[in-house]
Amino acid sequence: MKVFKFGGAGVHNVERIQNLATLLEVYKAEDLIIIISAMGKTTNALEKVAEAFYAGKKEDALQLFDVVKKQHVNTAKYLLVTRFNACLSQLMDFFTVVEDNDMNIMLLSLLLKKYFIEFDVAKDGEAGLELFNSKDYDIILTDINVPKLTGDQLAAAIRRSEDPVKAALPIIALTASIVADDLDSYLRTGIDDIMIKPFKEADFSAMLKKHLDHKIGASFA
């Protein structure tokens, strides 16, 4: 068995991707393991998207994300040539229109992956409660304004769990509200901490460290 590992620089343009394909063709009869990093500086580019978003610069974040999208679409266009139009619809599925909620999910996912934290995503409170009941977690992150069950309603349901360990899980809520009465009411439902959007990565890291460092020995820098 052969293992090929390609860093981002190894696939940063059309020519290098074509060279990669040629190399793999030589070994097509053998068992292969192929490890490929994000193309070019994609990870760095997505980190800039996250930084802009959490700095409250939503339009800048969307523009930066659009640059990443165009780079990948153009690369695919040159690689696929005659098959590009047939594959375009499938390719665009990877770059859906980014609304506020989708952007939040994408950027939180980037941050959690950065700290090597495994996680599940639920698009509404009811789906989140189903995941909570069926799996084991170390922490719950929820936006307050999620459909079906709001974040505070979800927190209240979690605190009513018959499993005392799961019922005591730390719950972090994300909200754009800075009204003191709103924040106090959220805390009364069983939410442990609240992060006001937009927030800085350093604040998010500190929150994770506060609730997880003692449990998993992770390092949040």
Image (tube, grey):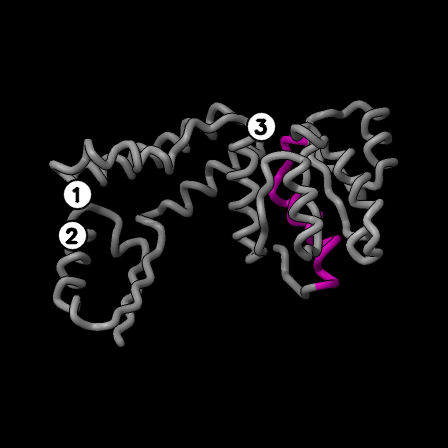
Q: Secondary structure at mark 1?
A: helix
Earlier residue among tags 1 and 2:
2
Label 1 crowd (10 A; few <14 / some 14-19 / many >=20): some
Q: CA distance from mark 1 to mark 2?
A: 8 Å
Dot label at residue 148: none
Earlier residue among tags 3 and 1:
3
Residue 77 position in % (x across, y down) = 19, 36
Q: Quadrant of the N terminus?
A: bottom left
Tell me which segment is drawn in magenta: 197-215
Q: Evaluate if marks 1 and 2 touch, with contact meaning CB atoms under 8 Å apart.
A: yes
Q: Residue at x 88, y 36 (%)?
A: 188
Looking at the image, which is closer to me, 162 or 143? 162
Please name the residue that numbered disc 1 is placed on: 79
Q: Which amino acid type is shown beneath numbered disc 2?
A: Gln
Q: Is residue 213 magenta?
A: yes
Q: Secondary structure at mark 3?
A: loop
Q: Secondary structure at mark 2?
A: helix
Observer-side mark, 3 or 1, equals: 1
Q: Is residue 82 magenta?
A: no
Q: Which amino acid type is shown beneath numbered disc 3?
A: Gly
Q: Quadrant of residue 142?
A: top right
Q: Quadrant of the C terminus?
A: bottom right
Q: Main secondary structure of the magenta part?
A: helix
Q: Is residue 12 visible?
A: yes
Please name the residue that numbered disc 3 is placed on: 56
Q: Is residue 203 visible?
A: no
Dot label at residue 18: 2
Label 3 crowd (10 A; few <14 / some 14-19 / many >=20): some
Q: Is residue 7 above or below residue 173?
A: below
Q: CA distance from mark 3 to mark 1?
A: 36 Å
